[in-house]
Amino acid sequence: MISARAYAAATAKSPLAPFELSRRDPGPRDVLIDISYCGICHSDLHCARDEWGGQPFPCVPGHEIAGVVSAVGSAVTKFKVGDRVGVGCMVDSCGECAACTAGLEQHCERGATWTYGGSNFYRPHDPGTGHTFGGYSTAITVVENFVVRIPDALPLDAAAPMLCAGITTYSPLKRFGAGPGKRVGVVGLGGLGHMAVKIAHAMGAHVTVITTSPNKAGPARELGADAVLVSSDRAAMKAAGSSLDLIVDTVSAVHDMDLYMGLLGLEGALVLVGLPPEKLEVSAFTLTGARRIFTGSNIGGIAETQEMLDFCAAHGVQAEIEKIPAQQINEAYERLLKGDVKYRFVIDSATLRT
Ligand code: NAP
Ligand code: ZN
């Protein structure tokens, strides 16, 4: 059994506080990872405050994990001690169903094991709890099939957010053919949004950022946006009507779908990746008027996550981060709610060890 230090929310109403937990000793197919950095995803905040409902507590969030392999099980073939690795939103799945076989482990028919708050166990799990604990911790044991390699060109701190924010935006961009000649919109310039802009730009698409924050217009262009729309400028939004082929919508709160979908041309698609706890509404006429598509996307599979990291390393794409000590997690959550982050908080796990 391996002891690890962590930060946990004891209840949905409590701030995160220091917490001790145990990781299992690596089984034959397991990799033990010394966590160097963990990104703070808006999903962590939704979960730590139980905004979606059903969250088990204590909750140790964190699914943007980057670190170094410190031990491997006897049958591990993909990794060795010292390798730079990452873990994202899942740590296991059944491995046998149609979704798993198709590389869509996140849609495992028996249920993927989420990195934190997960309870579908397919093999021995960490002792002392009925659910998984995430990456706001010093170490984690993960079966090798759910560990990815971080290319040398990517620093571990700036790679961490890509394990969720990177793959969640890469996957729909690829699925809907972002590339030269495609006009892609990105709604919300936060952690996910800034990765969407960088990746879509690297894929060769024409990128428009749609933001509620006028002060993000300049920074959006620096990230690779070709155009910026401020959503409160209704005249500019109207003038841009029907001008986009694809929109990746990363907004974390309820918002006016008709306003954004109106930017899509004939058969354009809006892919929702943001997960507001409230229901979203869209007018029938917005959809039928131009055969528009309203769909969603949930992270990406393991092979696709590796593909994303390799793509980003090859194209010089990495996350823009603000590193914080673990002691500032609660403050970071408040700043995240105010949109006061460029563009991802990353916990320096060394500060958990002191
Ligand atoms: P974030 O850093 O807080 O970014 C969200 C951005 O949305 C904000 O920066 C803001 O951008 C915009 N926004 C916030 N409130 C808004 C409102 N009321 N109306 C319009 N725009 C608003 O969050 P994140 O970490 O990128 O995560 C975004 C969402 O994706 C969360 O709900 C998270 O749970 C979800 N998520 C989903 C997946 C998946 O697999 N589907 C994976 C990870 C995260 P501007 O200032 O530019 O307007
Ligand atoms: Zn996430």
Image (cartoon, rainbow, N blue to C red):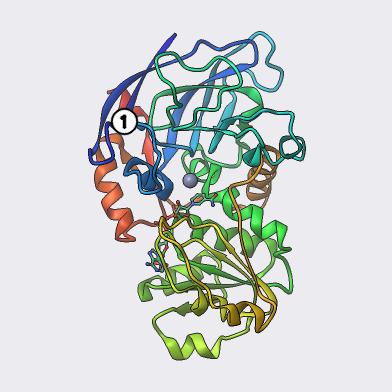
Residue 106 place in picture, x, y as percent: 62, 40
On-image quarter of the C terminus: top left
Q: Residue furthest front?
A: 284
Q: Position of residue 336 (x, y in %)?
A: 33, 54
Q: In the figure, residue 330 lies in which quadrant?
A: top left
Picture quarter with the N terminus: top left
Which residue: 77% across, 40% down? Answer: 102
* Residue under the point 40% across and 70% down: 216
Classify residue 50 by image quadrant: top left
Amino acid bearing label 1: Tyr
Which residue is denoted by mark 1 in the rendering? 7
Residue nearest the viewer, comparing 195 with 202: 195
Classify 219 as above or below 325. below
Q: Secondary structure at mark 1?
A: strand
Q: Answer above or below: position of 24 versus 100.
A: above
Residue 253 sits above or below residue 143 on the image: below
**Is label 1 within 8 A of ligand 2 (CB to nearest ligand atom)?**
no
Residue drawn where x is 73% and y is 63% of the image: 177
The residue carrying pointer 1 sits among few (fewer than 14), some (14 to 19) or many (20 or more) residues within 10 Å by Cα, namely many
Query: Which residue corresponds to the image point at 51% horizontal and 10% vertical from the top-left?
Result: 25
* Residue closer to the observer: 292 or 206: 292
Q: Is residue 248 left or right of residue 129?
A: right
User: Which one is in front, 129 or 16?
Assistant: 129
Residue 70 spot, x, y in % from top left: 52, 17
Please state the horizontal and vertical placement of residue 63, each as a whole percent of the image. Answer: 48, 38
Could you tell me how many numbered marks the image carries? 1
